[in-house]
Amino acid sequence: MPLLAVRDLEAAYGDFKALHGVSFAVERGEIVSIVGANGAGKTTTLKSLLGIVHPTAGTIELDGTRIEGRRPSDIVERGIALVPEGRNLFREMSVEENLTMGAHVPRARRSARSRVAAMYERFPILAERRRQPAGTLSGGQQQIVAIARALMSEPSIVLMDEPSLGLAPRITLEVFALIRQINERGTAVVLVEQNVVQALELAARAYVLSEGKTVMQGSAAEIRANPEVKRRFLGENSPP
Amino acid sequence: MTVVQLVVNGLLLGGVFALSALGFNIIYGVMRVVNLAHGDVVVIAAMVCALAFGALGLNPLVLLPVAVAGGFVLGAAIHRLLLRRLPAETASTEASSLTLTFGLSFFLAGGGLALFGGSFRSVPFLTGAFDVGGISIPQAKLLAFALALVLAAALAAFLRFTAAGCAIRATSQHLEGALACGVDIDRVRTLSYGLGTAVAAAAGALMSMIYNLNPQMGVQFTVNAFAVVVIGGLGSYAGCVLGALVLGLANAFTSYFVGASLAEAAPYVLFILVSLLMPSGLLGRRTA
Ligand SMILES: Nc1ncnc2c1ncn2[C@@H]1O[C@H](COP(=O)(O)OP(=O)(O)OP(=O)(O)O)[C@@H](O)[C@H]1O
Ligand SMILES: [Mg+2]
């Protein structure tokens, strides 16, 4: 049984149907990448998994339990965490308060203090900036806060929506190294990325989303070798 | 000397304005609801306090916690029973919540009139004044000011140091960020509307020591709180306190130099000036 199984997921914003048939699965401790053009529905998919957007059809199973339609508070409590597109930090709250909010769900709240201390050990830069409003940090540091905040609930699976968005290439490498490290500690990762090449290097498997539907799936190597993926996402016009 | 006296009057008044506006601000911050029923809660609490003081001789220091508790229960109930049932799409919620609180305002004002009648009431507690070097400091105003500060500090401490308070601030700064952290938004909203109403009721209890009020004067306090929040910068708690002191001073000076009836226009004038000249308020965030 996969850790996360999504079948025929549909979701809408008012009358506009953004997802019509998204299916994918994530095994325990795996990195899965979701690739797709702008507006394909990647963010909507991740928001639906977390319950921020309410799916209108389809099923989501976490560890064999159906969770579609539940509230975010319940879903985070059950072990899914999201690093949102654009980070969505609490800009006027300190780095420490942002981290503490990551442990807001009942399961994590009691040990919030020790979890913050552990994060400081792991990310010394956050310890240095602990009292600073999160909005005053550099883009790379803000992304680390967003990732650390998601890890505070010790999720079994973390959804990352374009974690390298707007970051300098060097910082992007650091973020990718961090994702690998998180995964090596046993956390499954769903990675949505514009940097498709790097994402596919990191992921074991990948899915391609187009116009709200899963249109392709396979091992990262297979997806990388697919001519259409090459043309559309890897910027290669002809095979080498 | 007159100027010093007016500054003292203005600041004392501003303290109570600040408390009232903090309640308005917390509701706007978390829910993006402009609570038009705010002032009606203020005057109804003032009426209840005046009657309780008259009939039972209850000390305002006893009435204040009762007002806070009663306000909280009333606000939480209003959110559970009414506001929460509005459709969830964010675009329409602001408009429909405005209509709802507008209706609520009429309901409370009418209910207040039916229950308490239209006569003016107050709590004549500590009617004397201290004389400090020729400056007169009315004891009731000083007490109301001090209590407002204590309550505002308690509110600030709650927002800063408790998990629920942090969730309230997080939700007002980034709704989706708070959702991503697994904040139970529904509960946070009930709590915020309850707290905002509790603070409005507390402000009413204090206003009853300063003003003669009747149940129909709610609008004035709504405008007052709204103006303070806009002057200070929507969503900013420090701005709220600053805006309230500015409004208190404006009120004191206009009532002395131009007359009491025109002092009521002070919030409108400041509101317009700030909207035109500093659209994000004295301490507002540019992005709000
Ligand atoms: N809040 C919203 N209201 C209405 N439509 C929306 C909303 N959010 C997204 N959409 C629409 O839903 C579709 C899917 O959007 P989504 O953000 O999920 O795409 P995406 O794959 O994450 O794109 P990007 O690569 O640009 O982040 C798009 O057509 C988008 O315009
Ligand atoms: Mg997106």
Image (spheres, coloured by chain):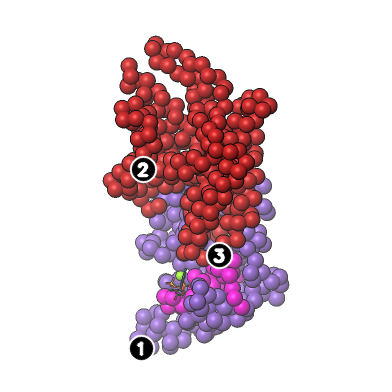
The residues colored magenta run A30-57
Labels 1, 2: front one: 2
Say which of marks 3 and 2 sits in front.
2
- Of the numbered discs 3 and 2, the one sitting upstream in the chain is 3
Q: Which residue is mark 2?
A: B268
Name the residue nearer the viewer: A160 or A118: A160
The residue that appears at 36% across and 24% down in the rendered structure is: B6
Residue A75: % across, % down: 64, 63
Question: In the structure shown, which secondary structural element does the residue marked by tag 3 occupy?
Answer: loop
Chain letter of the residue beneath label 3 in the structure image: B
- Expressed as whole percent of the image width and height from the top left, the position of residue A227 reads 43, 88
Question: Viewed as shown, does residue B287 lie left or right of B52?
Answer: left
Disc 3 designates what residue? B87
Whether tag 1 and tag 3 are in contact, CB under 8 A, the answer is: no
- Residue B98 shows in this picture: yes
Chain painted in purple in the figure? A
The chain that hosts pointer 1 is A
Q: Is residue B124 magenta?
A: no
- Between marks 1 and 3, how big is the CA–CA gap? 51 Å
Residue mark closest to the camera, 1 vs 3? 3
Secondary structure under tag 2 reads helix
The residue under the point 41% across, 56% down is A140
Residues at marks 1 and 3 on the same chain? no
Place of residue A24 in the rendered image (x, y in percent of width and height, measured from the top left): 59, 78
Question: How far apart are the two marked residues, 3 and 2, measured between alpha carbons?
Answer: 32 Å
- Residue A238's tag is 1
How crowded pointer 1 is (Cα within 10 Å; few <14, some 14-19, many 20+) is rated as few
